Amino acid sequence: MSDPSYPIGKFERQASYSPADLEGFIRTLEQFPAQFRAAFAGLEAAQLETPYRDGGWTLRQLAHHVPDSHVNAYVRFKLALTEDNPTVKPYAEARWAELPDSSIAIEVSLSLLEAIHARWTVILRSLQPSDWARTYQHPDNGLTRLDQALALYDWHSRHHLGHAVNLRVQMGW
């Protein structure tokens, strides 16, 4: 790993995704909550206060950030499926990571992640091929198709799992 900020590399949006790609992304989202939980299993409070890289979030903040992000993604999917090209609201993720709920026990957020992914993947599995072309407008990222958003959250899941796993390996935990 050459850059601890991007353990699996930076996200690269593609122009299109195959049905096999989409199936793989959905599988990632189905499996991710258990993998993420396992990456935090057995960690003590002091270990959770360790940043995953210099200048980065602590593992505790990371454990809370991922469900925050995925809750937003889940809502964006639902908006895109029920409205025509809705404008979604961005959020200040770094500031969210500093709010008091990012200092509570991580079990709360690990459970939230499991619940969100259980609901999200039900929706994803129900989509018809034409649904993947539905869009939302993000003020910072522009027009986003649902297939592209799914690819992003496949990457986001693996990206942050990499942060936690790599720190555990580096620290010998």
Image (spheres, grey):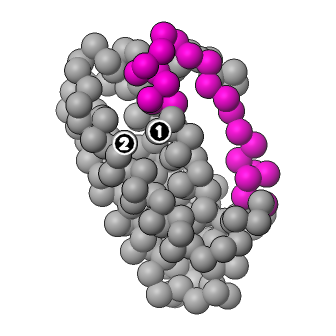
Which is nearer the eye, 129 or 72?
72
Label placed on residue 30 = none
Residue at 31% x, 35% y is 123
Is there a contact, CB below 8 Å, between mark 1 and mark 2? Answer: yes
Q: Earlier in the sequence, mark 1 or mark 2?
A: 1
Residue at 41% x, 15% y is 134
Q: Is residue 141 left or right of residue 148?
A: right
| Disc 2 target residue | 120
Magenta span: 76-98
Q: Is residue 96 highlighted in magenta?
A: yes
Task: Give, as a three-letter code, the residue at label 1.
Answer: Tyr
Residue at 51% x, 74% y is 107
- The x, y position of residue 24, in whole percent, is 26, 41
- The x, y position of residue 148, in whole percent, is 43, 26
Task: Give, as a three-letter code, the residue at label 2.
Answer: Trp
| Disc 1 target residue | 74
